[in-house]
Image: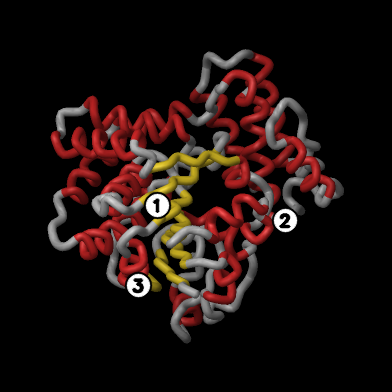
Amino acid sequence: MQVRVPRIVREVVERNPDYPAEIRASLEQLALDIESNARLPAPRPPAPDLKEWTAAHAEHAHESWLDAEWFHAELAAYREIASRCGFWESGRDPFAPAKAEEIEGDRPWSRLDAALAEGGSRLQRVITLLDECLWANRVDLGYAIAASRGREEGDLLVDEREAAAVRMTAPGSHVHVVADNTGTELALDLALVDALLEDPTARVSIHLKAQPVFVSDAMPRDLWQLVDAMQAGARTALHQLGERLRTAFDDRRLQIVPGPFWSGPRFLWEAPPRLARTLRSASVVLLKGDANYRRLVGDASWSPEEPFASAAAFVGTTVVCARTMKSDSVLGLPAGLAAKLDSTDPRWRIDGRRGVIQTFSP
């Protein structure tokens, strides 16, 4: 909070030189306030999530940036960035330059091309694509150290892809994907969605952020920019993928579900009743990325050997987490593995090298 988040705030200023002086000064003041441990500011209108954030702020109003519960403080910081940039009034995405740079580069498309070329049965391709989607989660534009890593043997600490894929490819399944980053990660997620929709009775709902958060987290406009880029490029396989996704959307087999909850301050067991019912009705809920894992498990210090079911059972349906590790919370690891990693690599929980694909089914 004291180093990385203020740096991200200042990068918004640097990468958006056309922003009005008032916005640039407000963002610099936010960076200074975080660094100096100022009191958490109260949420201000206009914003569609004002009621929810006002209630949450009341529980933390006495706290300051560096002393507050991390999950709340981090999300409050990103909400402040969006607010100070006038996102709700103008649609101004402070992270648009970083997102554009990612999709204009080769990384999303070369990795997507390779993933689409994979052969085998639909089940085997979904297993492979789950692996691709996991490691694409390293490409987090707010945490560059993770994106630079290659795969090494032993990096996947829990591999429950097969159990996940069996559930996801069941006839008539309705999979809800709670997305994380746009760019490379969402491109691979869309390849997975496409494979699931090969069953004409299957449906997929993709839950996206309703506001900019965590630099590269995906909003609906980011998804459609990716699809546009697929169809505008010269790669035939990518063009066809974009066409299939648009057709599935037009046929209502693919639904795009933006919501303020996914950038809000509450944990998943505190979800609004309508969202909780929606997730409970799913065949599978696939939670992508570190923040969604934290939202599921309460960003808490679990024993790493506690069964994953202890954190996931309340959802009421099959839950799959595909996450590269950028924060401390983890459970469901094999006995002794965490102790071994603690003794050999003290940063294993937070440096983005390792990952888990964990599955719970009631």
Query: Real-space Cα distance between discs 2 and 1?
Result: 24 Å
Which secondary structure lies at badge 2? loop
Q: Is residue 21 left or right of residue 246?
A: right
Under circle 1, the secondary element is loop
Q: Give the camera-side residue of 229 and 8.
A: 229
- On the image, the x and y values in percent for residue 141 come to 44, 41
Name the foreground residue: 37 vs 73.
73
Residue at position x 15%, y 34% in the image? 235
Residue under the image location 70 percent in, 41 percent down: 35
On the image, which quarter does residue 154 sit in? bottom left
- Neighbor class of circle 3 (other Cα within 10 Å; few <14, some 14-19, many 20+) is some
On the image, numbered disc 1 is attached to which residue?
A: 137
The residue shown at (55%, 53%) is: 278
Residue behind mark 3: 163
Give the x, y percent position of residue 55: 80, 45
CA gap between label 3 and label 2 equals: 34 Å
* 3 vs 1, front mark: 3
What amino acid type is highlighted by mark number 3? Ala
Element at label 3: helix
- Residue type at tag 2: Glu
What residue is pinned by disc 2?
69
Q: Position of residue 21 (x, y in %)?
A: 64, 14
Residue 167 is left or right of residue 94, and the answer is left
Residue type for callout 1: Asn
Above-or-below relation of 55 to 13: below
Number of residues whose C-alpha sits closer than 10 Å to that of mark 2, classed few (under 14), some (14–19) or many (20 or more): few
Q: Specify the label residue 236 is tagged with.
A: none
